[in-house]
Image (cartoon, rainbow, N blue to C red):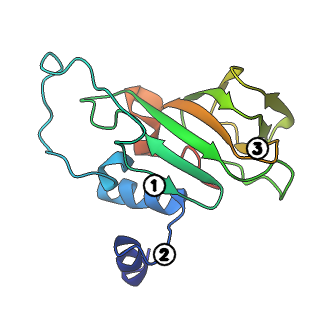
Amino acid sequence: MALSTLSKIELGQVAASYEKLLNLARALDIDISDLFEARDREVAPLTTSPVVRSTLDAVPRYDGEEYDYQVLAGNFPRRRMTPVHARIVVRAGQAAPKFVRHPGQEFVMVLTGSVQIAFETGPSLELGPTDSAYFDSSVGHAYGSVGREPATVVIVMTGLDGKPASSDHPPLAPG
Protein backbone atom coordinates (compact mmCIF):
# COMPACT_ATOMS: atom_id res chain seq x y z
CA MET A 1 0.00 0.00 0.00
CA ALA A 2 1.37 3.38 -0.95
CA LEU A 3 2.26 5.72 1.90
CA SER A 4 0.04 8.43 0.37
CA THR A 5 -2.92 6.01 0.43
CA LEU A 6 -2.23 5.15 4.06
CA SER A 7 -2.14 8.84 4.93
CA LYS A 8 -5.47 9.45 3.17
CA ILE A 9 -7.04 6.54 5.06
CA GLU A 10 -5.77 7.92 8.38
CA LEU A 11 -7.17 11.35 7.56
CA GLY A 12 -10.52 9.91 6.52
CA GLN A 13 -10.15 11.23 2.96
CA VAL A 14 -10.67 7.80 1.37
CA ALA A 15 -12.33 4.58 2.48
CA ALA A 16 -10.07 1.56 2.36
CA SER A 17 -11.44 -1.83 1.47
CA TYR A 18 -11.53 -4.44 4.18
CA GLU A 19 -8.89 -6.33 2.21
CA LYS A 20 -6.46 -3.37 2.33
CA LEU A 21 -7.01 -2.96 6.06
CA LEU A 22 -6.43 -6.69 6.60
CA ASN A 23 -3.23 -6.57 4.53
CA LEU A 24 -2.05 -3.60 6.59
CA ALA A 25 -2.80 -5.42 9.86
CA ARG A 26 -1.03 -8.51 8.57
CA ALA A 27 2.03 -6.46 7.53
CA LEU A 28 2.16 -4.87 10.98
CA ASP A 29 1.59 -8.29 12.60
CA ILE A 30 -1.43 -7.03 14.55
CA ASP A 31 -5.09 -7.96 14.70
CA ILE A 32 -7.35 -5.82 12.52
CA SER A 33 -9.27 -4.62 15.59
CA ASP A 34 -6.08 -2.80 16.66
CA LEU A 35 -6.54 -0.46 13.68
CA PHE A 36 -9.93 0.67 14.95
CA GLU A 37 -9.22 1.42 18.58
CA ALA A 38 -6.31 2.42 20.75
CA ARG A 39 -5.69 0.02 23.58
CA ASP A 40 -2.97 -0.95 25.94
CA ARG A 41 -0.70 -3.47 24.19
CA GLU A 42 -0.20 -5.38 27.44
CA VAL A 43 -2.41 -8.45 27.48
CA ALA A 44 -4.22 -8.88 30.77
CA PRO A 45 -4.31 -12.37 32.25
CA LEU A 46 -7.46 -14.20 31.27
CA THR A 47 -8.47 -14.57 34.92
CA THR A 48 -8.53 -10.76 35.31
CA SER A 49 -11.08 -10.25 32.56
CA PRO A 50 -13.05 -13.41 31.77
CA VAL A 51 -15.76 -11.45 29.92
CA VAL A 52 -15.64 -8.61 27.43
CA ARG A 53 -18.94 -6.92 26.64
CA SER A 54 -19.50 -5.23 23.30
CA THR A 55 -22.25 -2.88 22.21
CA LEU A 56 -22.67 -1.79 18.61
CA ASP A 57 -22.75 1.86 19.69
CA ALA A 58 -19.37 1.55 21.41
CA VAL A 59 -17.23 -0.43 18.94
CA PRO A 60 -15.64 1.20 15.89
CA ARG A 61 -17.50 0.82 12.61
CA TYR A 62 -16.09 0.63 9.13
CA ASP A 63 -18.31 1.40 6.14
CA GLY A 64 -17.12 -0.29 2.98
CA GLU A 65 -18.53 -0.56 -0.51
CA GLU A 66 -19.91 -4.07 -0.01
CA TYR A 67 -20.07 -4.49 3.76
CA ASP A 68 -20.35 -2.26 6.81
CA TYR A 69 -18.87 -4.07 9.76
CA GLN A 70 -17.82 -3.90 13.38
CA VAL A 71 -15.40 -6.26 15.11
CA LEU A 72 -16.98 -7.36 18.38
CA ALA A 73 -15.00 -8.10 21.56
CA GLY A 74 -11.79 -7.08 19.80
CA ASN A 75 -10.08 -6.46 23.13
CA PHE A 76 -10.65 -9.94 24.56
CA PRO A 77 -7.23 -11.27 25.59
CA ARG A 78 -5.84 -14.16 23.55
CA ARG A 79 -9.07 -14.60 21.59
CA ARG A 80 -9.34 -17.56 19.22
CA MET A 81 -12.22 -16.37 17.09
CA THR A 82 -13.25 -13.15 15.42
CA PRO A 83 -16.89 -12.14 15.89
CA VAL A 84 -18.16 -9.48 13.47
CA HIS A 85 -21.48 -7.66 13.14
CA ALA A 86 -21.97 -6.83 9.46
CA ARG A 87 -24.45 -5.11 7.21
CA ILE A 88 -24.36 -6.73 3.80
CA VAL A 89 -24.78 -3.80 1.42
CA VAL A 90 -23.97 -5.48 -1.89
CA ARG A 91 -26.97 -7.16 -3.48
CA ALA A 92 -26.80 -10.79 -4.52
CA GLY A 93 -26.57 -11.09 -8.29
CA GLN A 94 -25.74 -7.39 -8.69
CA ALA A 95 -22.25 -8.25 -9.91
CA ALA A 96 -20.06 -11.32 -10.18
CA PRO A 97 -19.24 -12.56 -6.66
CA LYS A 98 -15.87 -11.52 -5.27
CA PHE A 99 -14.89 -14.72 -3.54
CA VAL A 100 -13.00 -14.63 -0.26
CA ARG A 101 -11.07 -17.51 1.20
CA HIS A 102 -9.15 -17.74 4.45
CA PRO A 103 -7.94 -20.57 6.67
CA GLY A 104 -10.34 -21.89 9.26
CA GLN A 105 -14.08 -22.02 9.63
CA GLU A 106 -16.94 -19.53 9.53
CA PHE A 107 -20.32 -19.37 11.22
CA VAL A 108 -22.97 -16.88 10.08
CA MET A 109 -26.41 -16.10 11.49
CA VAL A 110 -28.79 -13.74 9.74
CA LEU A 111 -30.36 -11.14 12.02
CA THR A 112 -32.43 -9.17 9.49
CA GLY A 113 -33.16 -9.55 5.80
CA SER A 114 -32.04 -12.45 3.64
CA VAL A 115 -28.52 -13.32 2.59
CA GLN A 116 -27.13 -15.39 -0.25
CA ILE A 117 -23.75 -17.02 0.26
CA ALA A 118 -22.21 -17.97 -3.09
CA PHE A 119 -19.45 -20.59 -3.07
CA GLU A 120 -16.82 -20.88 -5.78
CA THR A 121 -17.36 -24.64 -5.79
CA GLY A 122 -20.92 -24.43 -7.04
CA PRO A 123 -24.37 -23.81 -5.61
CA SER A 124 -25.22 -20.90 -3.37
CA LEU A 125 -27.11 -20.95 -0.09
CA GLU A 126 -29.91 -18.55 0.85
CA LEU A 127 -30.54 -17.75 4.51
CA GLY A 128 -33.39 -15.79 6.09
CA PRO A 129 -33.77 -14.28 9.57
CA THR A 130 -32.47 -16.59 12.33
CA ASP A 131 -31.08 -19.05 9.76
CA SER A 132 -27.43 -19.95 10.17
CA ALA A 133 -24.66 -21.76 8.35
CA TYR A 134 -21.26 -23.15 9.30
CA PHE A 135 -18.67 -23.79 6.61
CA ASP A 136 -15.02 -24.29 5.71
CA SER A 137 -13.87 -20.76 4.96
CA SER A 138 -10.92 -21.94 2.85
CA VAL A 139 -13.55 -22.48 0.13
CA GLY A 140 -14.09 -19.20 -1.72
CA HIS A 141 -17.33 -17.53 -0.59
CA ALA A 142 -19.15 -14.23 -1.08
CA TYR A 143 -22.10 -12.66 0.75
CA GLY A 144 -24.91 -10.73 -0.92
CA SER A 145 -28.18 -9.25 0.36
CA VAL A 146 -31.22 -10.79 -1.34
CA GLY A 147 -33.76 -8.05 -0.58
CA ARG A 148 -33.96 -4.37 -1.38
CA GLU A 149 -32.50 -3.41 1.97
CA PRO A 150 -29.11 -4.44 3.37
CA ALA A 151 -29.17 -7.56 5.53
CA THR A 152 -27.52 -7.75 8.95
CA VAL A 153 -25.58 -10.76 10.15
CA VAL A 154 -23.27 -11.93 12.89
CA ILE A 155 -20.26 -13.80 11.58
CA VAL A 156 -17.79 -15.69 13.75
CA MET A 157 -14.54 -16.77 12.13
CA THR A 158 -11.71 -18.95 13.32
CA GLY A 159 -8.27 -19.29 11.84
CA LEU A 160 -5.94 -22.23 11.96
CA ASP A 161 -3.88 -23.03 15.05
CA GLY A 162 -6.25 -21.14 17.33
CA LYS A 163 -5.54 -17.71 15.80
CA PRO A 164 -8.42 -15.35 15.00
CA ALA A 165 -9.21 -15.36 11.29
CA SER A 166 -8.62 -11.60 11.01
CA SER A 167 -4.98 -12.10 11.95
CA ASP A 168 -4.46 -14.42 9.00
CA HIS A 169 -6.53 -13.47 5.95
CA PRO A 170 -9.48 -11.26 5.10
CA PRO A 171 -12.77 -12.81 6.15
CA LEU A 172 -15.04 -10.49 4.20
CA ALA A 173 -12.78 -8.85 1.67
CA PRO A 174 -12.82 -9.49 -2.05
CA GLY A 175 -10.49 -12.32 -3.03
Query: Residue 132 has which mark?
Result: none
In the rendered structure, the answer to whether residue 98 lies left or right of residue 95 reads left
Residue lying furthest bottom: 4
Q: Classify the position of the C terminus by image quarter.
A: bottom right
Which residue is label 2 attached to? 14
Q: What residue type is labelled 1?
A: Leu
Q: Where is residue 125 in the image (x, y as percent from the top left)?
A: 82, 30
Q: Where, by quadrant of the figure, is residue 82 drawn?
A: top left
Above or below, 116 against 79 in this view is: below
Q: How crowded is mark 1: few (under 14 residues within 10 Å), some or many (20 or more)?
A: many
Q: Which amino acid does label 2 sit on?
A: Val
In the rendered structure, the answer to whether residue 137 lies left or right of residue 38 reads right
Contact? badges 2 and 3 (CB < 8 Å): no
In the rendered structure, the answer to whether residue 140 lies left or right of residue 77 reads right
Above or below, 85 against 90 in this view is: above
Above or below, 12 against 122 in this view is: below
Q: Where is residue 25 in the image (x, y as percent from the top left)?
A: 37, 55
Q: Residues within 10 Å of mark 3 (few under 14, many from 20)?
A: many
Along the polypeptide, which appears first: circle 2 or circle 3?
Answer: 2
Along the polypeptide, which appears first: circle 3 or circle 1?
Answer: 1
Which residue is label 1 attached to? 22
Q: Position of residue 10 (x, y in %)?
A: 34, 71
In the rendered structure, the answer to whether residue 51 lies left or right of residue 120 reads left
Q: Where, by quadrant of the figure, is residue 143 drawn?
A: top right
Which residue is label 3 attached to? 145
Contact? badges 1 and 2 (CB < 8 Å): no
Residue at left 44%, top 59%? 21
